[in-house]
Amino acid sequence: MLWKAVCLAGVCLSAFAAFLGGATDFIADRAARQAFDAIAAHAQALKADRIVADPSRGEIRVAGLSWDEAGVSVHIGALRLAAEPVAFSVSAAALAQAAAASAEDVTVKTALATVKISRIDLAGTFLSAVELAQILDAKSAMTIGDRIAKISAAAITIPELITETKLGSLAQKVVYRNISLTGVVKGKAAAASAEGASFSVSDPEAGDTEGAYGHLTAKAVDLVLAARIMSGTQDDPAEPKTALYDSFSVEGFHLSNATAHFDLGVKAMSGRGVKGRPLRMALAGAPEDDQTSRERKKRIALLYADVLESIAIDGMDASDVRLVVHGAQEPVSLSIDHVSMTQFSGMEIGGFALQNFALASESAKIGIEGFSLRKLDLGRLREALAKASASDEDAARSANVGAAMPAVEEMVLTKLDVDFVETKTGREGARGVFSAGRLEIRESSQKDGAPIQMDAKLEHFTRALDQDDGGAFKDLSDMGYSQLDLSSRIAMTWDEAKQELAIGTMSLEGADMGAIQISGLFSNITKDILSPNREVATVAALGALLKKIDVRIENTGFFERAIAAQAERQNKSAGALRQTYARAAIAFLPALLDNGPEAKAIGSAVAKFVVQPRSLHLVVVAPDGLGLSDLTSIQAPGALLKKLDIKAAANE
């Protein structure tokens, strides 16, 4: 919006500088008026209250200049154009040679916004008479962008620029200070900058929001494209995105809302490789208050999808982000040292990362050293927006937030620390503390939103244990553990053609405890098992069949501690209790499983592990598959065993 407003004002100034640059001689005022009328004849919307030529000072002054064309109106209270006195001439062709111009009290109105400029100065601007006539011709089919493309100037400066935008019930006002454009050639500026800006947004529902920017800069700004985006629509649905600006930077940003009780601050922001193209729907056609709720939601969904597909950014960074929420409840503060995003291309984000995230309140603290996402596919979001904008009410209602969550190829979290005040009965006021060294989730080769491959890993989830803990945590504390230190991994692959899910590994390992590793194969697995619809997912899960499962247990201390704790409670020695369990495994397990050869092998392996607990390995194969219905229909465990091939071994 800023660059569009500057462009529109620049068009007028350059044009008016061109037709009045040298219009004085012995009858200077009359000659200037005649020259103005000659050009205004081709631009019927162009009007001026008064024109005065001053040959001695080498300038022409115009008062009450106005132009109203193609939905854009421009009013300039006072215009001054300067040129070398010797260059003054009464011809319209010579009026295209003013080298400098200035204007005061400039107002530009479009369907979307009103722009007010206290003063604007142009230097080194030249136009031919033909170009001037084309720019000002109200009957011409040229767009605002086409007209801006004919403007060149060495420099454009504006001390203050105010934009006022009304969009439905929302009203926004932005005030820019000390704007500068340099090296403007055919509507493209080599550099643009502003000393700063302040803004306010009035919203009946969200309340009033206020904010400010520090020093702003941009390089290689395409003012023509900016004007097309703000005022036009796509001419060609296949139009590619092109460079809007090469880079930008903002030194400081602040945002606050008294109703929502928050304050947001950012020390610095920057971006590079910003590309865009005009939208399919005009911004001026955004939702209005008099539209029905359904119409508003539909247009908003269409607008969001349109915007996503019409912009691309090579990279963005923000540093020292601070957010404070201070409502009726306890204040909450959030801080992030650095946030970055790379390769946003409409429906995909190449990468997103943050460093040193901290969330704190009186009752909880959360810290994350690093968090990153790679290859975020926004296709689900596009589908959700399409449903939300659908004419069919049923399709629109089926859109939900869960279905819109982007698919992520990789997520990595490092050094998570959580400290909170517990509210559980019996633990009120106690501190709950846990941490995680690293969490990784990798998904690849997705099919309709369902991952074909997934590999997730959690390293060193730790939690302090004490006697005040309850449940399993208290049992571990009774076994002599002062800290829980767990690591886990799950890796699986889904073969859509075979409808098979292969679990490469599913493991859980505890420091000074041991590890359990599981692998397996399931058949009749469809993508519906991951459906956001719970009923659909449940039906799919009930149809799954187990083909093979491989379980391996490694003991590095847990079993000995468990035996010792139970022996103490039963007033027995650990050795005696171990022998009791071994005899039970040999006697009762085979009997429970109908005393078949496989049942006896299982009992013998378990007994061997109990006596000398190093490892236990169990492999179960179901040639015809084993489903949940089999488990519920079989009355005796022995009958179930007949459907399976089982091998068991200990300490191998």
Image (cartoon, rainbow, N blue to C red):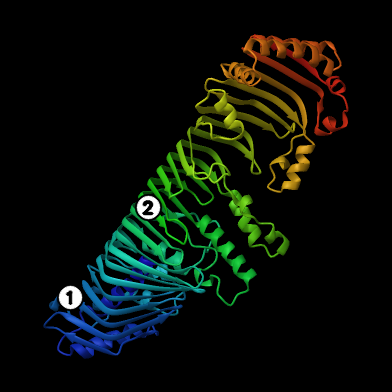
Callout 2 touching callout 1 (CB < 8 Å): no
Pointer 2: what residue? 322
Dividing the picture into quarters, in which one does residue 327 lie?
bottom left
Horizontal side, residue 132 vs residue 484: left or right: left
Residue 131 visible here: no
Pointer 1: what residue? 83
Q: Secondary structure at mark 1?
A: loop
- Observer-nearest of 296 and 47: 296
Q: In the displayed orientation, state which residue is furthest to the left.
A: 56
Q: Amino acid at mark 1?
A: Ala
Instruction: Work out whether 154 lies above or below 368.
Output: below
Instruction: Work out whether 384 lies above or below 67.
Output: above
The 10 Å Cα crowd at callout 1, few under 14, some 14 to 19, many 20 or more, is: many
Residue 579 picture location, percent across and down: 69, 10
Look at 87% across and 28% down and name the residue there: 634
The numbered disc on residue 600 is none
| Mark in front: 2 vs 1 | 2
